Amino acid sequence: MSDPRTTAAPAVPAASQTTELAALTGRLQAHVRTLAGEIGERNVFHPQALRAAADYLRAQWASQGYQVVSQSYEADGVRSENLEVTLPGASQPGEIIVIGAHYDSVSGSPGANDNASGVAALLELSRALAQAKPARTVRFVAFVNEEAPFFDRGEMGSMVYAKAARARGDNIRLMVSLEMLGYYSDAPGSQRYPPLFGFFYPDRANFIGFVSNFASRRPLREWLQAFRSHSDFPAESLATFEFVPGVAWSDHLPFWREGYPALMVTDTAFYRYPHYHSHRDTPDQLNYPAIARVVMGLQAALTAMASRPGRSE
Ligand SMILES: [Zn+2]
């Protein structure tokens, strides 16, 4: 499962691509600074900050030309909302790709990597695709209440969303959860693993990970292939048991529960990030040029999955 290409030297990007990357890097950093720096800890215990984060998302998506839809409900007496924008499918509008990230942060943390980095990527993917005409429908969703005490409970934003999708009979062909995309290291031994996995994967934390259960291994493989064919950023994939610690710990879990294929995009969180769920998870810890390269690869993967009717069952 480990791919030797991950250690290949990166190609030299063309000048226009360098400019594009620099601009993307700046926008990603601005999103993270606003969410984790200015707004800070955002959850039901800090409802004003949670609302400020939602308002920021709404304003960003409105400026990209999207119509923002809110799915609102109460959690512990606090109004909570998932926010969504949609790119309608040109030829297969009933086949849906959902890509999402949670915008709340865990109690006691400003949540720069967890998960302002995922939200920043989500905002830049929607911007990049705003004028696209994919075959399938693409929904960009910002989920609320992923962190404790809501994880895997009825008030978890992605659970509310996935249950409603199943009740409507939505034909979701793939759900992708963006969960912590910001921390990388080239130091030997910087990457840790659950027991046994370290024998098969690199020991340097310089790659982006794609993770799924066994049922979603086919779309996982397609996603990895599409990413690698458009990006020289190191990428690793893992399809394994849901009980392996961390594998199910994000917004893709409720989609698995509802029988939808889903995968997680992650820097592997606590397997490499020293400031996981800490007050030190601040904007200055993240590698923005690396996130930008990851986002460009994700854009290619998302575009490929959105233009493949009939695939990825
Ligand atoms: Zn998280």
Image: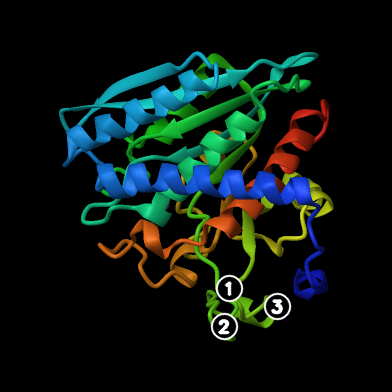
| Residue 284 pos. (x, y %) | 38, 62
Local SS, label 3? loop
Residue carrying label 2:
187
Residue 300 occupies quadrant: top right
**Of 209 and 259, the residue lying toward us:** 209
The quarter in which the N terminus is drawn is bottom right
Q: Nearer the viewer, mark 1 or mark 3?
A: 1
Local SS, label 2? loop
Please, what is the three-letter code of the amino acid marked with disc 1? Ala
User: In the rendered structure, are the residues bearing label 1 and label 2 in contact, judged by CB atoms less than 8 Å apart?
Assistant: yes
Q: Can residue 136 be seen in this view?
A: yes
At horizontal 50% and vertical 61% (from top left) the residue drawn is 243
18 vs 139: above or below: below
Please, what is the three-letter code of the amino acid marked with disc 2? Ala
At horizontal 48% and vertical 24% (from top left) the residue drawn is 61
> Could you tell whether 35 is left or right of 4 in the image?
left
- Label located before the other in sequence (2 or 3): 2
| Residue 283 pos. (x, y %) | 37, 56
Q: Which of marks 1 and 2 is in front?
A: 2
Q: Can residue 255 be seen in this view?
A: no
- Label located before the other in sequence (1 or 3): 3
The label on residue 205 is 1
The label on residue 200 is 3
214 vs 202: above or below: above
Local SS, label 1? loop
Please, what is the three-letter code of the amino acid marked with disc 3? Phe
| Residue 150 pos. (x, y %) | 29, 43
At horizontal 43% and vertical 44% (from top left) the residue drawn is 30
The quarter in which the C terminus is drawn is top right
| Residue 248 pos. (x, y %) | 50, 53
